[in-house]
Image (cartoon, rainbow, N blue to C red):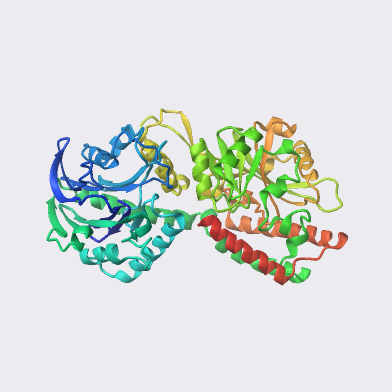
Amino acid sequence: MCTVTFLPTSDGFYLSSNRDEHDSRGLAESPKKYQINGSELVFPKDPDKGGTWFAQKGNGDLAVLLNGAFVNHVKQAPYAKSRGLLLLEILSQHEPDLYFEQADLIRVEPFTLIVFTKGLLFEYRWDGLEKHCALPDPSIPHLWSSATLYEEQAQKTRQQWFRQWQESVGQLSIEKVLDLHRFGGTGDSNNDLVIKRSAQLMSTVSITSVFWRPGQSRMVYVDLKAEIADSDRAISSLTIDHKQDDQAQLKAGLWMGWASRLKRLRIRLLNWEYWPLEIVYLPVLPYWFWLSLKARSLFFFSAANPSIRNAGFAMCRKSSIYDLMSEKHYPKTLLCKSSISIAALTNGLQAKGLNFPLMAKPDMGERGVKVELLRSLAEVCAYLERAKFDFLIQEYIDFEQELGVFYYRIPGESRGHISGIVGKEFLGLTGDGTSTIEMLLIQEDRYFLQLDAIRAIYGKLLKMVLPAGSYYRLLPYGNHSRGAKFIDLSCKVNEELLDTINQVCLGMPDFYYGRLDLKFNSWEELNKGRNFSVIEVNGAASEPTHIYDPKHSIFFAWKEIIRHWRILYQISQINAKSKALELMDARQGMKMILEHKRYSKILLG
């Protein structure tokens, strides 16, 4: 119940589990058939409470249990119900996937439950406060490790050698799968698939593996404790004939995985806004090199914003930019070091007067990565647990509209310019009274690309039908990579708006070039300088994001990129000469790039 693998084959899959328990735990009973709530279930039985960690229903449905949800929780016994008994309760239902959503889990210890039903793979988690549901792709392998036994780094290491094993194993067989679960790892008895932690009196006591194919499955059970005692009951095998034709369900699940991949590929190929940045920027790189040659520095931008580290190109802290601004122009913000304790964080929230919901984001960001909306203290704690980087917690600005305004000011001028405005449509849906949320998402290419992320957040709620005409916002993030639609609103530039933006930017010493992302209540109020908040300022690396409006061609994008690089070059050159600044040399530039590369690995890890 502490390590689980899912390995698809051409005609089925292997679902396997290693059970790690305290050495004092009694020997479990080998798998047998039982009648639970009117359903025939096959499972090895825990002698202490009568539950199980692995079970199969007569129709082919499967469920496997792992202790813990996302992090190693603090036990708060006594609990109302055994998780092993809860597994049997859920799997014995006619529709296990729907029953989980309705089950009362108050005073149940956190757990993760992997369920195969209706040809789909479900990942359910209960963190002690909220239920979470995800739908892993059944066409690719998966490995889960118990959050109570394996720390984040150990889980990453396990995933790494699990991938290496997949590359070398060749055609799967029950023997190879059992070998993986017996000998997989790097020789670390604390974190291999079979563990022996003497200090904790904890070890792997059994392996359960099912080879599932349409119409029939085979369950193999290896009792490692009995094996040590040279018992005849160490290995047992049981063949289970499914009581219904589930071949169509499996094929539907596997086909859905492949069809989804092909659709994503088609969308990305036909819409340049989803192309990798390297592909988008490659044709215009010669112009960057031409500007570098003229400036005698590959990093000709480095004097564009003298008051910001690296001119805001990379490795620049958002908190340092906020420090340059008037507090009235940006949300209330708490800077949190990665080492901050939950007590200090809670005290900081109270001192700042920050109330839920809140926005969390890395102090040094990367295209919306790890930006999250936090609705409770439990979510704050979970974010802190995952964050290996300094981050900001900000008040959530609930203005409905969001913009990106590209601003530049030629040094020596008292008034700047707005070179582009991008409006952002959040990922939201309008119901038609008949389609589920998931059906509506599938119909829209932009939203389909976000489907896996949305499933992980909303789970079975995606089966809900929205009333006709009702609007529901699914993601509150104005990032292109998170499903927001970018619309070129450069036509909205006027003198009043420029006055508003100019006032903000002139308040930041030596700021000449970048993009301001802001939320606002109405255009009329924004033009008057009222009811808006700057949620982020980007420097020399800013993109003119109005290019990502679907109506624009890649040729328009290249033209705008070149135009903004030309402005960046001009500003940096003037500052370098008038302020006697030296442009970044090759050594400094490579140091910045390497630091950014190392930090990106931490951020994306």
266 sits left or right of 252 in the view? right
353 sits left or right of 438 in the view? right
Indicate the position of residue 267 as horizontal and vertical percent values.
45, 53
Residue in the foreground of this view, choosing between 439 and 516: 516
317 sits left or right of 72 in the view? right
Tally of marks? 0
- Taking the spot 83% from the left edge, 45% from the top edge, the residue there is 415
Indicate the position of residue 98 as horizontal and vertical percent values.
29, 36
Residue in the foreground of this view, choosing between 414 and 226: 226
- Is 263 drawn above or below residue 444 in the view shown? below
Residue 498, located in which quarter of the rendered image? Answer: top right
- Is 583 drawn above or below residue 485 in the view shown? below
Q: Is residue 200 visible?
A: yes
Residue in the foreground of this view, choosing between 346 and 250: 346
Residue 465, located in which quarter of the rendered image? Answer: top left
- Taking the spot 47% from the left edge, 56% from the top edge, the residue there is 268
Indicate the position of residue 231 as horizontal and vertical percent values.
14, 61
Indicate the position of residue 538 as horizontal and vertical percent values.
68, 50
277 sits left or right of 310 in the view? left
Q: Is residue 243 visible?
A: no
